[in-house]
Image (tube, grey):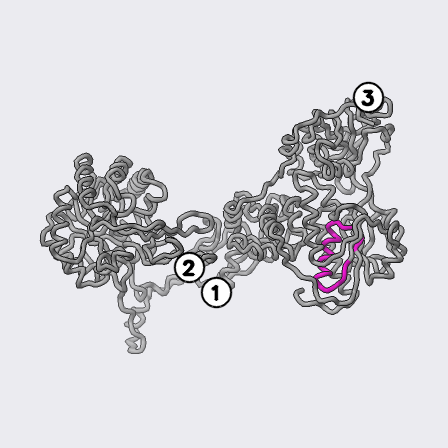
Amino acid sequence: MADLSVKFAGITSPNPFWLASGPPTNTGGQVMRAFDAGWGGAVWKTIGEPITNTSSRYGAIDFNGVKVMGFNNIELISDRPSETNLREIYEVKKRYPKNLVIASLMVESKRESWHQMVRRAEDAGSDALELNFGCPHGMSERGMGAAVGQVPDYTEMITGWVKEVARIPVIVKLTPNVTSVTHIAKAAERGGADAVSLINTINSLMGVDLDSFSPRPSVGGKSSHGGYCGPAVKPIALHLLSSVARNCRLAISGIGGIGYWNDAAEHISLGASTVQVCTAAMHFGFRIVEDMIEGLSQYMDDHGFRSIEDFRGRALPNVMDWGDLDLNYKIVAKIDSGLCIGCQLCYVACEDGAHQCIEPYRSAAKKNDNGFGVHVPRIIEEECIGCNLCALVCPVENCITMKQIDAGEVPLSWNDRVRQSNSTLSLPFPSGD
Amino acid sequence: MPLRDTAPKLSPEQYERNFADISPAMTHQQAVTEASRCLYCFDAPCTIACPTHIDVPAFIKKISTGNLRGSAREILSANILGHSCGRVCPTEVLCEGACVMHEKGESPIEIGRLQRYAVDYVLEKNIQLFQAGAPNGKGVACIGSGPASLACASELTKWGYDVVVYDRNEQPGGLNTYGIAAYKSRATDSVREADLVEQLGVKFCQEIEVGRDVTFADLEAQFDAVFIGVGLGETWALNLPGENLHGVYGAIEFIEKTKTLPFQEVEVGRRVACIGAGNTAIDVVTAARRLGAEAVYLIYRRGEPEMPAFAYEYELAKRDGVSFLWQTQPVRVLGEKGVVTGLECVRTELGTPDARGRRHPAPVTGTEFKLDVDMVVRAVGQKPATEFLKQIKGVEIDSDGTVKINDRHQTGHLKFFAGGDCVNGGKEVVDAVADGMAAAQGIDVWLGAPRAVGR
């Protein structure tokens, strides 16, 4: 069976699944229950000068009747005294020495304050520190959280202060609310960080009640921007993760839209060593980790990966700049008329939304069990540009597949073409994040 | 005169439970979740299958976005009786039968219930979605206030016609009010829908029988066109000895009692036989069981495969514990002192299929047996309203007793148009609505009235 234990910036986690800093890691009781359920580590709810939270504080977006597609919060860091949090960290570590407890920290931007907090967190027995430079709401207005993480110089400076005293690994948590996350990651690297974790939540306003005109989540009819997370943010997280992984050498803990083992495996394949989960645990409880462990382990066995390291970053070389993609690669859509249910969503999507390569049904060749005709449309293969849209909107698994057409041409990218033509008019695509 | 023996009376709560809505209203969350399952098909099979061609994906999408008024408008502009149809349509052989979900191996979208959900909203809030058109100076009379007439009347009113509906019953709605199983729809549901048509500006003259209280000549003189939507007549007789005994009822007559009287006052035998196996027969046997009858027999001279009732209806009767006597034919109704005491039956043998593919049943001598029952209900179809129709000079009647019409729904008397059961011989509410709407178009074209806006 695959070994799920993972080395991360010099410390070892029993598995890559950590609870992210947030409501599920607010207390020692929760963290211990999480460890009992199987979580490898927990990043404690951010410790700092206690704040007061609002009521309400969470918002969600449901999609087509499915709850919590996206989630946001306007909750700040821990509202409990730091002594309480640190005492509980001490107690948890005493009882769960093999599980990792990472103290998430946020204090005012003064060297002394950071030095003091780092020492206290270490004394409590934390395995690592996570510097919360990412919280997008509430704290950033006070010069903390994202206010630090959005400025490379501040990130480097404060990471440096922490590293002056820290004896345990230091993880810098990155905010996605920047133009280039790589710049911030590199600043953390320059400051001496051992690792980065990303992404923190995305700045968001969840919606507006159209009767009261109160934004959501409503605090007495008012609201404020908060941090967006949940299944909807995974693609953003994967992109930012891959750009950091391509440009930095630091260990990475992946965060963003992870609810299942396969989400975690995707993060790992793009370079993460561990992953952090919050929204899914808030939605379904700590027990979800059981399937995550089993599913990931099964996946690794099926693919012959004996350790996380065996497939970590495997997808990374395949993330390329657009200018390097092969323009001679050609696929076309095929409809399996036996599987087709006749909704014709592919037809209307292609006709109105893409490239007019599908014909509607002419006559119903097959009938359903009640004798009604099934409207199977037809791909005009010579027109098909292989965009995927029809296959994406088709509600039936494997009904529309994209088949490769061998045009007999050698691979050629835009950048190849520019190089071959020696044209000064068509500039090659620069590589980006 | 009482029946020989009647079903034991139930508590009022038990009656209400027995006749509770078979397909209860959806909650907001149920409706949105179900609406969200709809794939929003292009050129949707459900819309094609609907006789009134309601744009089903469009109204369902509007439910999922919370645009219930728009959803109801989508439904009611295609079918003014969208509420009733949502309750009583045999959706499994229409829209839901055509739903692509069958091919996907999933249950079809609950189109009927969603339709009702959307229309309930505007009915409960009494939202009038349509307005009468600017008066065009033309008047149309509708005879009968069933689904065909209501559809015809509301369409014409929207286009600026002055429409008067004449109906002999106390309540409007025709069979939709008086002839639908109570667990599918109550009389008040149908009347509420007719109110919507009245609010649009249609005038209703209830308890006025044309030919008796008003002459056809009067209508002809007063109106520019007349729509005949009188449906069918009485239930066919069995032509059996003993048929006139007390305790023999027509199906329509029996169902009407369940719709107009409190349930505890509807007389029903302890043991009941119903002759016929169509959808109306199912309404009869299920009503009899739900009213407390202890033994209910459905008697049909052909076999189960030939049963005309829809599969869904048959299931209802099976679940209600009805006994089915296939290949059985009544011979005579037995009685004592003028009251039904039993039914003599004989087994049948099925011959070779006829031109319509139906196998003709022949009695098998020596297989006669007696069924001990207190009540016999005839559910062998309704006669056409030929006697009534014959009163209108020029209106031609087909050999099967239905009204002959052209493609404008115009009869042999050019001023008279017709639609619904009196033309099609007896179909669903939704077919009558489609007919009424088509007749309205026909009248409009024939009268050459200027087209009103908002068409």
Relative to B439, is B368 above or below?
above
User: Label 1: how many residues lie within 10 Å, few (<14), some (14-19) or many (20+)?
Assistant: some
Residue kind at label 3, given as amino acid type = Gly
Residue kind at label 1, given as amino acid type = His
Residue B76 % position (x, y): 64, 55
Residue at horizontal 36 percent and vertical 50 percent from the top:
A56
Q: Which residue is mark 1?
A: A355
Q: Which residue is mark 3?
A: B366
Q: Nearer the viewer, residue A326 or B430?
A: B430
Label 1's element? Answer: loop
Residue at horizontal 33 percent and vertical 52 percent from the top:
A73
Residue kind at label 2, given as amino acid type = Ile
Q: Which mark is residue A331?
A: 2
* Quadrant of res B80: bottom right
User: Label 2: how many residues lie within 10 Å, few (<14), some (14-19) or many (20+)?
Assistant: some
- Decide which of tag 1 and tag 2 comes sooner along the chain: 2
Mark 2 or 3: the one toward you: 3
Label 3's element? Answer: loop
Q: Residue furthest left?
A: A164
Q: Which mark is residue B65?
A: none
Q: Nearer the viewer, residue A34 or A395?
A: A34
Q: Nearer the viewer, residue A391 or B205?
A: B205
Q: Disc 3 sits on a residue from what chain?
A: B
Rounded to the nearest angstrom, the CA distance separating label 1 from label 2 is 14 Å
Residue at horizontal 20 percent and vertical 36 percent from the top:
A96
Please indicate whether residue A155 sits to the left or right of residue A59 in the image: left
Q: Are marks 1 and 2 in contact (CB under 8 Å)?
A: no
Rounded to the nearest angstrom, the CA distance separating label 2 from label 3 is 75 Å
Q: Which residues are magenta?
A: B142-163
